[in-house]
Image (cartoon, helix red, strand yellow):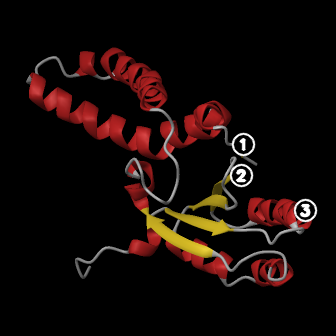
């Protein structure tokens, strides 16, 4: 091994913003639904969130998650995506795309131009709802097997197990499941395919 990491193996999130041209909103929505169908079949596709414009806004924001940067690049170079983008060219502004590898997406700072943040109390509640059962499971299943371990080492092991579960399983799942509730206070419609 060379000691370098393979960034293409990390999950990646594409944040794509497009603005429909005036009078083409209905056609844009139809093409957007086509895209969601193509994405569901794309290798490595995890999820797509669509944040529709709220009052005073015009941009649609698509948050597309892939298992790896390579799979995201393969999708971007695919004939399906190219054909879809060609159909969309007369209907909308050019896309503005951001690629966010790994954990960066989950730590988008408040006030970021990328995506509006849910209210902090909702983020805290969902985090608590995910951490609590994982902590209980660790305490019930693993801690009894390690009674002689010092508390700092048991806590470290617990953290090493809980953080990946939260990052790659629990939080992506619960945020998809609760997407409408998370955005309800902002007046945005979020649909998860």
Look at the numbered discs 3 and 1 and tell me whether their residues touch, using CB distance below 8 Å.
no
Q: Earlier in the sequence, mark 1 or mark 2?
A: 2
Quick one: SS at disc 2?
loop
Q: Earlier in the sequence, mark 3 or mark 1?
A: 3
Camera sees residue 193: yes
Residue 58 % position (x, y): 70, 60
Look at the numbered discs 1 and 2 and tell me whether their residues touch, using CB distance below 8 Å.
yes
How many other residues sit within 10 Å of disc 3, few (<14), some (14-19) or many (≥20)? few
Look at the numbered discs 3 and 2 and tell me whether their residues touch, using CB distance below 8 Å.
no
Is the residue 40 above or below the residue 93 in the image?
above
The residue to which callout 3 is attached is 30
**Quarter-of-image position of residue 130:** top left
The residue to which callout 2 is attached is 52
Residue found 23% across the figure and 34% down from its top = 157
Quadrant of the image for the N terminus?
Answer: bottom left
- Disc number at residue 129? none
Q: Earlier in the sequence, mark 3 or mark 2?
A: 3
How many other residues sit within 10 Å of disc 2, few (<14), some (14-19) or many (≥20)? some
Residue found 50% across the figure and 59% down from its top = 114
The residue to which callout 1 is attached is 189
How many other residues sit within 10 Å of disc 1, few (<14), some (14-19) or many (≥20)? some
Residue found 52% across the figure and 53% down from its top = 115
Residue 77 % position (x, y): 67, 85
Is 143 displayed left or right of 90 in the figure? left
């Amino acid at each position: 091994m060379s000691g370098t990491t393979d960034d293409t193996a990390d999950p990646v999130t594409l944040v794509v913003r497009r603005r429909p041209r005036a009078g083409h909103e209905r056609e844009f929505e139809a093409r957007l639904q086509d895209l969601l169908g193509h994405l569901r079949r794309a290798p490595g596709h995890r999820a797509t969130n669509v944040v529709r414009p709220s009052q005073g806004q015009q941009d649609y924001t698509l948050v597309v998650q892939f298992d790896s940067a390579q799979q995201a690049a393969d999708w971007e170079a695919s004939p399906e995506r190219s054909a879809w983008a060609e159909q969309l060219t007369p209907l909308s502004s050019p896309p503005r795309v951001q690629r966010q590898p790994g954990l960066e997406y989950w730590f988008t700072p408040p006030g970021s131009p990328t995506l509006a943040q849910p209210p902090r109390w909702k983020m805290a509640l969902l985090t608590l709802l995910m951490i609590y059962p994982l902590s209980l499971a660790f305490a019930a299943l693993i801690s009894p097997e390690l009674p002689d371990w010092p508390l700092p080492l048991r806590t470290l092991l617990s953290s090493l197990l809980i953080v990946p579960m939260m990052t790659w399983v629990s939080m992506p799942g619960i945020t998809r499941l609760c997407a409408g509730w998370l955005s309800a206070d902002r007046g945005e419609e979020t649909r998860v395919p």
